[in-house]
Amino acid sequence: MVCDGKVCELERGRKQKCKRGFATKREAQEWERKFQLQNSADLDMDFESFAELYKNDVKNRLKENTWLTKEHIIRTKILPYFGKMKISEIGTKEIIAWQNELLAYRDEKRNPYSQMYLKTVHNQLSAIFNHVVRYYDLRSNPAAKAGNMGSEEHKEMLFWTKEEYKKFADEMMDKPVSFYAFEMLYWCGIREGELLALTVADFNFDKETVTINKSYQRLHGEDVITSPKTKKSNRTIKMPKFLCEEMQEYISMLYGLKKKDRIFTVTKSYLHHEMDRGAKAAGVKRIRIHDLRQSHISLLIDMGFSAVAIADRVGHESIEITYRYAHLFPSKQAEMADRLDDLGKGDI
């Protein structure tokens, strides 16, 4: 109900909720109408109101940085178009019109959105409608019916050979923090966020292991430590002896360090700058920080380890290793054909 410039109503039958500060009675009545639609999850609510429900339902189930990415897409690419439309009135025609606007976009340099970005934006809209279907009884997902836009981009897989990495590492020795950081990235295949979250307590030099159980993010100008990317990412890695000795040497250089203190307090941009510097000085191709992880995986494949063993070390699913790095594994086709030939001849 509306009374004395404020809106008062029962919130889910538990307590009265009041909101003040409306300029007009009409504004107050509109807020009350939206609140009641949200409270009853009525599909005649506008998309903007449902986006608030969606946020309340899913935000606390996601990592903060994951939600921030989703929220940015919703706020900048979805709400400006669908915000005032009723959920029940959004069909495939409206979805396709929205897609066409995004497909036609060009920036100041006449560049369109990337195929991967278009796919990501559409997937977010579809995820919202899947949520309405699953929990709020919408009959079907119009975004799924309209079909996706964009496509997944398969970037060239770059990695360094051991010889290329050695040349690069030699150039890093003038800055100990850079040298030891890249040693961990290359010889353990850990992610950048996992590296920057490492503490003294994560190392067991008697057992020659490092435990990966957290990841570093920089959010809202603050250092944030979160759980690793996936459950599989929680793992204990056996380190080569030389790397154990190097890390003991590095930690001994850090004065007054406590067990829970991070040992690499540099920024991600610092590491990227050092990659630029080292690659140029070493005369090797410039690769991304993440490509050091791929370099580690390719090294293990070259050494003859199985996809299952490699996946366990780097925190992947073995099927993902098989799929993404299949071209690097030695081909068994000739051996298969020979054995099938023997079988066909009755020799086996």
Image (spheres, rainbow, N blue to C red):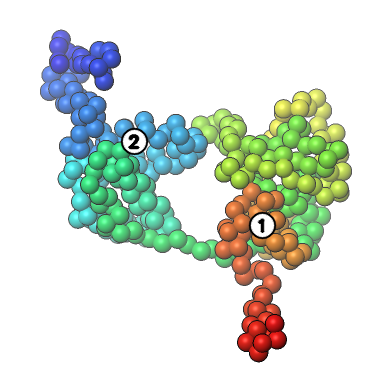
Instruction: From the image, tell me which residue sits under label 2.
Output: 54
- Count the numbered circles shown: 2
- For mark 2, does the 10 Å Cα neighbourhood hold few (<14), some (14 to 19), or many (20 or more) residues? some
Q: Is residue 288 visible?
A: no
Quarter of the image holding residue 254? top right
**Mark 2 or mark 1: whose residue is earlier in sequence:** 2
| Position above or below: 323 against 203 | below
Which image quarter is the C terminus in?
bottom right
Query: What residue sits 73% from the left and 50% below the top?
Result: 188
Q: Secondary structure at mark 1?
A: helix
Measured as percent of width and height from the top left, residue 230 is found at 57, 44
Q: Amino acid at mark 1?
A: Val
| Position above or below: 205 against 114 | above
Q: Is residue 115 visible?
A: yes
Quarter of the image holding residue 338? bottom right
Query: What residue sits 54% from the left and 31% below the top?
Result: 221
Query: What residue sits 43% from the left and 57% below the top?
Result: 116
Q: Label 2, label 1: how many angstroms apart (C-alpha)?
A: 38 Å
Which image quarter is the N terminus in?
top left
Quarter of the image holding residue 203? top right
Q: Nearer the viewer, residue 35 or 118?
A: 35
Left or right side of 154 for 75:
left
Measured as percent of width and height from the top left, residue 148 is found at 34, 58
Residue projecting furthest to the bottom: 345
Left or right side of 344 for 1:
left
Instruction: From the image, tell me which residue sits under label 1.
Output: 308
Q: Secondary structure at mark 2?
A: helix
Q: Nearer the viewer, residue 289 or 190?
A: 190
